[in-house]
Amino acid sequence: MDIRSTQLFLHLASSLNFAKTSEQMFVSPSTLTRVIQRLEQELNTELFIRDKRSVKLTTEGRRVQQFACLWLDEWHQLQLDLAMSSSQLVGEIKLFCTVTASYSHLPDILDKFRVLCPKAEIKLTTGDASIAMEKVRSGEADIALAAHPEQLPSNMAFHSITKLPIGLISPTLPGKVADLLALDPIPWHDIPMIQPERGPARSRFDRWIKDTGITPHVVAKVDGHEAMVSMVALGTGVALAPDVVVQLSPVKDRVKALKVDYNFADFDLGICLLSKRNQEPLLKAFCQVASR
């Protein structure tokens, strides 16, 4: 059981989707299948129950998952401890993230990173999540804290941190939007909607209207999740936004979650950087701290 096999197993144990793990871990489906089969042969047990529709961990698979998590954490900690003696862990990291991420997830990461790499400097820039990949690709940022895009560019690496639920929100203010949402059934074709300009939120918005057959009444197109929440708070319409953005918004009392019979895919929040820089000691140390 080597490091790479362990990483692939743990990702599959989390995603329970061979195609997703293959894409996000940059291996072919056949290679991933062989890795899992080899692990099962080495351990002489079945780790996954799989058929054409689903993948599930067995009881033994869950035990291996717990062991592998602890073992990989110890390995990463050892790497960081040994790297601490290297003069290479000195320098500057240009980091890009949204304003909300700078409040919600970045402080905890930076607290741990400063302990491990006290001589490193962080230069932080904030902006719209949809331009995070372009900031990294252009060299304006070394790394970005962002949601996994629908299609990850082939020259980019992504280290997952956590999942972020996303859902529809509506204004609490009385008015046209509230009146329409109070009808049964809801006349979705007439509901004013604020459309994400681009990025992961846009792809989820487009998939929702395609799956439901709604012809959206788009009254505004907005870049940035924080701006989306503000537009809803003003009573402009309904919008799709991550729960964490709503929770940390100064206008959170003026918006509310809108219950619909649809499951929006969570955002996969993580660290992205150019693949060719994935092994640079300083950036690698940051990614390892963030991923833990």
Image (cartoon, helix red, strand yellow):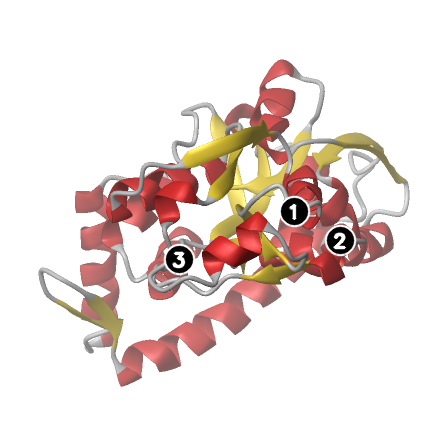
1 or 2: mark nearer the eye:
1
Q: Is residue 235 shown left or right of residue 117?
A: left
Residue type, label 2: Ser
| Quadrant of residue 47 within the rendered picture | bottom left
* Disc 1 from disc 3: Cα separation: 41 Å
Residue farthest right in this picture: 119
- Rendering coords of residue 26 (x, y %): 35, 38
* Disc 2 from disc 3: Cα separation: 32 Å
Of marks 1 and 2, which one's residue comes earlier in the chain? 1
Q: Quadrant of the N terminus?
A: bottom left
| Quadrant of residue 247 within the rendered picture | bottom right
Element class at badge 2: loop
Tally of numbered tags: 3
Q: What label sits on residue 235 in the rendered view?
A: 1
* Disc 1 from disc 2: Cα separation: 15 Å
Q: Is residue 151 shown left or right of residue 171?
A: left
The residue positioned 60% from the left and 67% from the top of the image is 74
Q: What label sits on residue 11 in the rendered view?
A: 3
The residue positioned 69% from the left and 49% from the top of the image is 233
Q: Nearer the viewer, residue 154 or 7?
A: 154
Can residue 25 be seen by looking at this rendering?
no
Q: Quadrant of the C terminus?
A: bottom right
- Rendering coords of residue 281 (x, y %): 68, 37
Q: What label sits on residue 250 in the rendered view?
A: none
